[in-house]
Amino acid sequence: LSRIYRLGKCAYIGGGFGQGIHNTLEPAAYGIPVIFGPNYGKFPEAVAFIRSGAGMSVKNKDDFRKALDHFGQPERQKQVKQKLGDFFEKNAGGTKKVFDYIEQQFL
């Protein structure tokens, strides 16, 4: 599934109507907007996507249709791709930070 996102224009992420949502980072890494249910508050990246305009939360089919219309516009897709690129650039280097921490604490 993760590789098929590169072919998409928008991704609906499962979950969000129970305890949480599925992985938003996989489709976002391809620069496509993400749509998910309303229970996303425990997921910092989903919150960041909402704030930046690269993601939308939906509660019902009408919200879903509006989100598709919103993200279906070519200019908006371009904006989302740029915002997601900025997000990943800003948050790059996490693995190195973890390894540096482990090295300092335990080695």
Image (tube, helix red, strand yellow):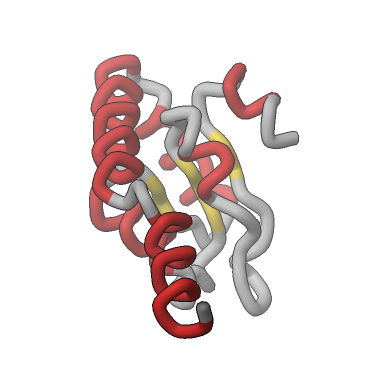
Left or right position of 91 against 69: left
Residue visible at 24% across and 27% down? Answer: 79
Residue visible at 35% across and 42% down? Answer: 88
Q: Residue furthest right?
A: 1
Q: Is residue 2 above or below residue 46?
A: above
Q: Residue furthest bottom?
A: 105
Viewer-closest of 72 and 82: 82
Q: How many marks?
A: 0
Across and down, in percent, residue 48 comes to 32, 58
Across and down, in percent, residue 57 comes to 45, 57
Question: The N terminus lies in which quarter of the figure?
Answer: top right
Report which quarter residue 80 is drawn in.
Answer: top left
Left or right position of 5 against 40: right
Across and down, in percent, residue 78 comes to 29, 20
Viewer-closest of 24 and 102: 102
Residue visible at 42% across and 40% down? Answer: 66
Left or right position of 107 against 85: right
Q: Is residue 31 above or below residue 14?
A: above
Across and down, in percent, residue 7 comes to 61, 17
Residue visible at 42% across and 29% down? Answer: 31
Q: Residue furthest front?
A: 107
Viewer-closest of 37 and 24: 24
